[in-house]
Amino acid sequence: MIERFWSISIGAGMDDPAVIRHPSASVEDYVKAIWEVAGSGAASTKDVAERLSIAPPSVTNMFVRLQEMGLVEYERYRGASLTRRGREEALRLIRRHRLIETFLLEHLGYSWREVHEEAERLEHAVSDGFTERLAEFLGHPGQDPHGDPIPAADGSLAPDDSFPLGEATAGQRVRISKVGDDPSTLEYLGDHGLVPGRLLSVREVRDLDGVITVEDEDGESHALGAPLAGAVFVRGE
Amino acid sequence: MIERFWSISIGAGMDDPAVIRHPSASVEDYVKAIWEVAGSGAASTKDVAERLSIAPPSVTNMFVRLQEMGLVEYERYRGASLTRRGREEALRLIRRHRLIETFLLEHLGYSWREVHEEAERLEHAVSDGFTERLAEFLGHPGQDPHGDPIPAADGSLAPDDSFPLGEATAGQRVRISKVGDDPSTLEYLGDHGLVPGRLLSVREVRDLDGVITVEDEDGESHALGAPLAGAVFVRGE
DNA sequence: CCAGTAAATTAGGTTAGGCTAATAATCTGG
DNA sequence: CCAGATTATTAGCCTAACCTAATTTACTGG
C-alpha cells in the first residue's frame, strides 16, 4: 500500500506534490470530529457520523483511509483513535479555527451567531503562514472570544481546568472561562453581560431544581436554570 | 435536463440546498479564466486549458456543464462566452480576490510575491457577507495594491483607461496605475519605488530598442527596457 | 482547393467522497 | 446466555473533476 502524504519518500519522489499535499477539507473535518468526540480515546462510527451529518458507511470508509494516511489507529468494530500526527493535525485546525473566529468577532464585526459557519469554511483554506501572521496581527491571543484555549503553533494546548457553573458551590468566587456555543444561549448570556472574563460570586445553589444564583462585578444578580448553568464554564478564583 | 443551481424551481424545492448552493471552486475558476482570456468574447478550449493548467478535454467537458448551469453560451468548436450571470459570477470572484489581496498586503505583512497563492485559495472560501465586511474594514478601496480596479459589490467595474508605459510619448506626465504580476518584475519595480500611484515624467523614448527613460517625483531617473516598460501600466495625468 | 497541422471532441478510465440496502457483529436486558 | 436492538461493515452506486488516447473538425498556406 502506498502512503498518501507525508510518507517517508526516498529520492526523487521527495518533492512530488502528491506526496507532500495537505489533507483535504474532508480529512481535516474527520480528524477534528474524532478529536472532539473522543479526545485521546477511540471515536465510534456513529458519533463521528452524527457530528459530521454523514452516513455511517461513509465514516467506516474514511476511517480506513485515515489509517492508511497514518492519522488514526482503526480496528473494525472498535472505532478510531488519533495517532500523534492525527492529534497534531486536529490541533492545527482548531488553532486556525479559533484564531479566525477571534478575527471575525473582534475586527470584522461578526456576531457570535454568524461566526461559526464562516470560520468552518475558512479554516480549510488558510495556510500555516496566514495563520501565524493572523496570530501576530491579533497579538497572539491565548483564547478565543468564547474563552476556549487556542492551541499554540507547536500543537500544545493549555489544560482546561474549567467546570460548569452548575457544579460550583455557594460562596465560591469564579471567573467565566467560556460559554457553550448554542446561538440562543449565547445571545441570552451576552445580553446579560455574562461573557468570558467576567467575575462572579456564587450566592445560592438549589439542588431541587438546579437553579443557581450569582452576583456579578457590578452587584447585579442573575438566577440561572440548569441548562444555562451547564453551558457556562468557570474557573475558581 | 435538470438545471444545477439557481434554477427557477417551484414549490418545495425552493430552499433545497442542492438548488441554491454556491458554484464549486472549480466552476469559479473556470468562469474567472474565461473572463480573463476572453473578456466579453468567446474563450477557446485551449486558452482556458492553458490558464488553468488543465487538459483540454476536461475543459470541453466543463464548458458543457457551465452551459447547463447557465453561466456560458457554448457551441462546439466555437468556444464559450460568459452569460450575464457568468460575468457577474466572475466579477464577484475578482472582487473577493482583490479585496483579500489588499488585506494580506496592507494588514498581514505579506509581500507581493506571497500574496497571490493565498488569495487564490481564500477567494473560494469567503462568503459575500465576509467580503462586504472586509471591504468596510479596508475602507472600501477602489483598487488593489497592484492598481487593478476592484469591482463594486453590484458587479460594476470601472473602465480601465491605462496603457503600457512603453506606449507613452516623450514629455508626457503619467501616473503608474498598475504593474504586471510577474514576481521578479514586481520585486525589481518595488525596489526602485516604481509602484502604483507614483507620478512619472517621460524623458525619452527610444524606438530602436524600446528603452524608455522616466523621472520620478523625487527627481530620480529610471531607464526601463521593453519588457519592463510593457509591464508597467500608466494613466495620463 | 486541398493537404497537413492545430485545436477540439469523444471514448473510456481514475479518485475522492458521498449514498442506500443488505448483512454481520456486538451489546444488553430479561 | 441468548434474542432483539443497536451499531458497524460490506456491496454496489453515483457525481464532480480530473486524466490519456484516439478521432474528428477547422484552419491555413501553397
Image (cartoon, coloured by chain):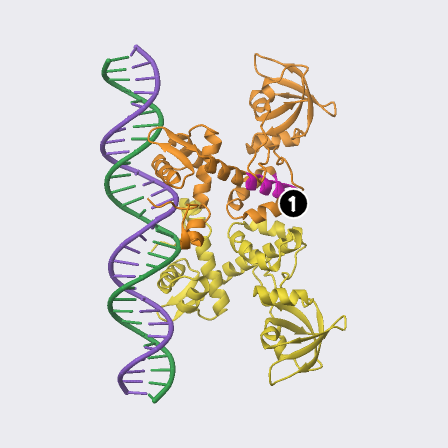
Chain colours: A yellow, B orange, C green, D purple
- Please determine whether, in this image, residue A208 is positioned above or below residue B224: below
- Please determine whether, in this image, residue A86 is positioned above or below residue C8: below
- Per the rendered image, the range of residues in magenta is B95-111
Q: Nearer the viewer, residue A154 or B27?
A: B27
Q: Quadrant of residue B106?
A: top right
Q: Is residue A8 visible?
A: no
The residue that disc 1 covers is B136
Which chain does tag 1 point to?
A: B
Q: Characterize the local packing of mark 1: few (<14), some (14-19) or many (20 or more) Cα atoms within 10 angstroms.
A: few
What is the number of callouts on the image?
1
Query: Residue farthest to the right?
Result: A218
Q: Amino acid at mark 1?
A: Glu
* Residue B34 rendering spot, x and y as whole percentages: 45, 33
- In screen coordinates, is A91 left or right of A18? right
Q: Residue at x 55, y 54 (%)?
A: A118
* Residue B235 rendering spot, x and y as whole percentages: 63, 24
Q: Is residue B213 visible?
A: yes
Q: Secondary structure at mark 1?
A: helix
* The N terminus of chain B sits in image quarter: top left
Q: Residue at x 52, y 37 (%)?
A: B91
Q: Does the magenta segment cover residue B109?
A: yes
* Residue B84 rendering spot, x and y as whole percentages: 47, 35
